[in-house]
Amino acid sequence: MYVEHTLIKPRSIMERGYQSSIAQSCLRASTLLVLPTGLGKTVVALRVAAEVLHSRGGKAVFLAPTRPLVVQIATYLSDHLMGRTVDIMTGENRPEERQAIWSGSDVIVATPQSIANDLEKGRIDLEGVSLIVFDEAHRAVGNYAYVKVAMRNHGALVLGMTASPGATRKRIAAVCGNLGVRELEWRDEDDEDVAPHLHRVAAEVIEVDVPEHMIEVQERLRRLQRASVEVLVGMHLMKGDRAATVPYLLQVNKSIQSRMARGGNRGYLFRAMSASAAAIKVAHAIELAECQSTAALSRYIEKLKREAGSKSGSRASKQLAASPELDEVVRLMDGADEHPKMRIVRELVEGQLELRPSSKVIVFTNYRDSCDAVIDMLSSRPAVKASRLVGQSRRFGDEGQRQDQQVRVLEKLRDGTINVVVATCIGEEGLDVANTDLVIFYEPVPSEIRSIQRRGRTGRSAPGRVAILVTRNTRDVSSLQASAGKERTMHRHLSRMKERKAVMSA
């Protein structure tokens, strides 16, 4: 049975009872829709948009965080919506082009920054908009552009969509308040109306030990970090009995910047900033040694030395590059074995492709250095056709990927030109790959939102697998525990909110 609607192409969308029920609910009031990945949030949005355009007229605006997502949504709407024009607006369009698109289109799919900027400049307004859809709605906090757009809403129906709104009641309430939604629609894997449409995802945690040579490397790096930490402790900017991890040092750095903004002693604070920068760089190197790979750490040290040798190199990078401890680290890594995670990734990928040659695999890693190291390792395997997927931002010696390049990577994975994508966080939101068979977490992430999004890249149209690699007695362990705990808390809050809604409507 297919969805029948005046504005939806006949026999293009299969009817699912829960999608129909959710769409009808979302048409009655502005709603936050929380739905596991693969259950058709975009289908629901299409059905809501078709009815709003048919019954109320006006424009429908779909917002998505990145251009690849914008392109995917616009393509889907164009393929299924009849009798209405669908166009794209992003920062790549000139302002006058965006004004023309806005005036001449019924459905606009855009990045929120482009809409927020044009609203602020007075180039457009939301007076004639009947529906605003916020994809990845969990981003609607703080100063993000979703909040700025929602503030200028003149009565349009709002549909916020996400697989994971956040772990705390405060965060969920902030998302709802910032978008101006009053209702919640939530389904999880255990709900009887969605369970028949879900595919089994087999998840396993694979534990490994820190390689022996990396224990020595870490000791040298901690010795290198000690001088910077002692400066910060002596300035009473950090506690000497607390581990100098990247997250803690970033907090310290934020505190220093705040003092500087308030007009503190600039000479004193510049010294603190330099010590903080050096400590953060070494903390990152320690984490690479513990949980990533020898190749990733080597790449990072090479970039650090290139940065130190450049005219724009910071004082912190120059001091670190000149240190005997860093030279000792390089010596210890020369010819050393790889981190066991690299071997496991290779075995998992090759095993999947041997079992099913048409398989598609995604490997998620937090860092570009690890991403490139995994790509180099996999590219030497005969059955593997791998490509990386990273963000646009430039890093020293790395230009990143433009959004059109990101789109091409996804297209190549869909059409089988490549069979493995190694992605940083850019690949976590909205990857439109219906038949990904295996997802590998190179490391756990402490965020429940990111963990849910990573897992959601498989099990869409067929059973899938998820493998999470964990280095024992490292930050990996606490990250795994944190994300699992936050996800349980999120489900508890959503369940209570859903129960209260049911009681109120009874």
Image (cartoon, helix red, strand yellow):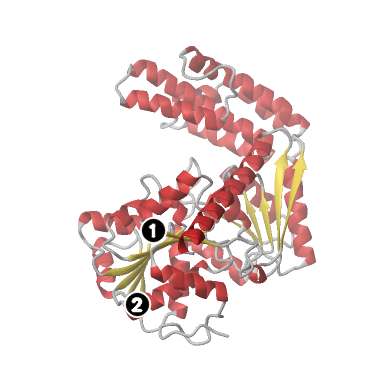
Residue occupying image coordinates x 70% and y 48%: 468
Q: Which residue is mark 1?
A: 181
Reply above or below: 17 against 373. Answer: below
What amino acid type should be assigned to the residue bearing mark 1? Val
- In the picture, measured across the screen, residue 484 lies left or right of residue 350, that is left
Task: Identify which residue is drawn at 45% across, 73% down.
Answer: 24
Instruction: Identify the residue shown where x is 66% and y is 29%.
Output: 330
Mark 2 or mark 1: which comes first in sequence? Answer: 2
**Residue closer to the observer: 115 or 312:** 115
Q: Secondary structure at mark 2?
A: helix
Give the residue number, with chain letter if any, for mark 2: 53
Q: Nearer the viewer, residue 186 or 68?
A: 186
Taking 436 as reference, is 29 left or right?
left
Q: Provide residue 346's location: percent of width, then percent of height.
A: 74, 52
Q: Name the residue rendered at 78%, 53% in the picture.
A: 347
Residue 403 position within the rendered picture, expressed as x and y whole percent measured from the top left: 45, 58
Q: Residues within 10 Å of mark 1 (few under 14, many from 20)?
A: some
The image quadrant that residue 366 belongs to is top right
Of the 4 image quadrants, the one containing the N terminus is bottom right
In the image, is residue 173 above or below residue 161?
A: above
- Amino acid type of the residue that numbered disc 2 sits on in the rendered structure: Leu
Say left or right for 139 vs 428.
left
For mark 1, give the secondary structure: loop
Q: Does residue 431 lie above or below 193 as drawn?
A: above
Q: Position of residue 500 (x, y in %)?
A: 50, 55
Between the C-alphas of marks 2 and 1, the distance is 20 Å
Question: Is residue 85 shown to the viewer in this render?
Answer: no
- CB-based contact (under 8 Å), mark 2 and mark 1: no
